[in-house]
Image: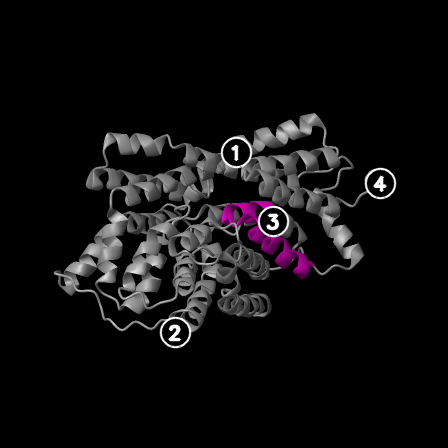
Amino acid sequence: MFIFSVPVTLKIITALVSILLVNKFTKNLQLSVITAIVILVLWIQLPFIQVYKIIFNKLTSVNTIMLLIVIYEITILSNLMSETGMMKKLVNAVNSIVSPVYGMAVLPAIIGLLPIPGGAIFSAPLVDDCDENNEIDAILKTKINYWFRHVWEFWWPLYPGVLLAVDLTGLGTFTYSAVLSPLTLFTIAGGYFFLLRKVKITHGKKSSALNMFELWRNIFYQLYPIIIIILLFAFFNIIFPELAEISNYLPMLIAVFISLAAIIILAKPDAAMLKRNLFSRKIFNLIYLVAVILLYGAVIECTLPNGSLLMDQVRLEISSAGIAPLFIIALLPFISGLSTGISVALVGASFPIVIGVIPQNISEMQFAAYIVLAAGCGYIGMILSPVHICLIVTNNYFKSNLTQSIIRLLKPVLFIVAGIAILFCLYYFI
């Protein structure tokens, strides 16, 4: 006899909604996800010993430990680059090369290479500085700064959300980044046609005492921590593939550690700065959040008391109800992104469900097509979220209207929608 009177699918959706509701009232994502875990565990009647095993096995797995260490390292690296003045020197050099119009896009995009929470506040003054004569509407500057700050977030492997998505999908970092990266081109195109083309600035480039060679050399020097990570990550995966066999995150862990050592040696942050970042409460809160999200995903992957997998039951229920999997794969990440405004939260809350809904016995590229749909729709929800911290701090800086800023992002979002549709068809049918 089937022991659940309420469909498992409804129970999972209720747990997801609880994340959104609890977060709305408490502004605490960790507590929100823990609440969802408790609701789900109690409602599907998991025995205590099974819950204990799920928690223990997930938190002690090599991949989980490596992932948390990588996120810890990356956050410290981001903070050190900011606090040692490297990012400021970098953007000043860029602002001396490109025209003010393109500088307004390039500067936040450079800041976006590092996953600094609320990083748009670093680029907002630089975007504003391109408008020396105050000729541009505040809402337009808000949209440009916010939009181009996030063009890499689909696939850039320094983002915790991407790292978590790689872990949950099992595609591998190279494959995941390769299939998602074309969406960056559609995002840039949407930003150009609907945002940058509206910019009218009468003054020219900024002057600099340095020649062009010195400026480019300065740019690459300030980027050396990121360049080290990219080169070493590729080197380890090509020359020492056995490292990835130990853990998918071991090559990244080593690469970021070496980059951190380089910035400590060359930039010479003082002991107080190092101590402040090594023991930062904000960093540990992020680690805590990722760990909780991983546990939520582990519960989604669990076996029910009747012996069937939780997600197998979801697939059966969806099939019986005639609900199109495409609708669920697109909608759940969108809602999660819209409600949380954080990529790591939307991935953790929706991807375990999405992966379970994806049809079985399909090719890797067809599986990637569904992941593009989920990740792309999640990104759209996140970028339109009124609780996205980057949007909030940018609006505060430019003193622009939050609602109007979101509404006026709908047009460039259409380019992302088109990109998702094109890539889905390309990966699935070709």
Marks 1/4: CA–CA distance: 33 Å
Label 2 to label 3: alpha-carbon separation: 35 Å
> Image point 39% across, 57% down: which residue?
398
- Count of picture labels: 4
| Image coords of residue 199 (percent x, y) | 36, 71
Q: Nearer the viewer, mark 3 or mark 1?
A: 3
Q: Do residues under tags 1 and 4 come within 8 Å of each other at their CB atoms?
A: no
Label 1 Cα crowd, 10 Å radius (few <14 / some 14-19 / many 20+): few
Q: Which residues are magenta?
A: 325-351
The mark that comes first in sequence, 1 or 4, is 4
Residue 360 image point, x, y percent: 67, 55
Q: Quadrant of residue 361?
A: bottom right
Secondary structure type for disc 2: helix
**Callout in the foreground (1, 4):** 4
Q: Position of residue 43 (x, y in %)?
A: 74, 36
Task: State which tag comes first along the sequence, 2 or 3.
Answer: 2
Q: Which mark is residue 282?
A: none
Give percent across and percent down for residue 50.
68, 29
Q: Is residue 255 above or below residue 412?
A: above
Residue at figure coordinates x 40%, y 48% from the top left:
115
Point out which mark residue 2 bears: 4
Amino acid type of the residue that numbered disc 3 sits on in the rendered structure: Ser
Of label 4 and label 2, which has the lower sequence position? 4
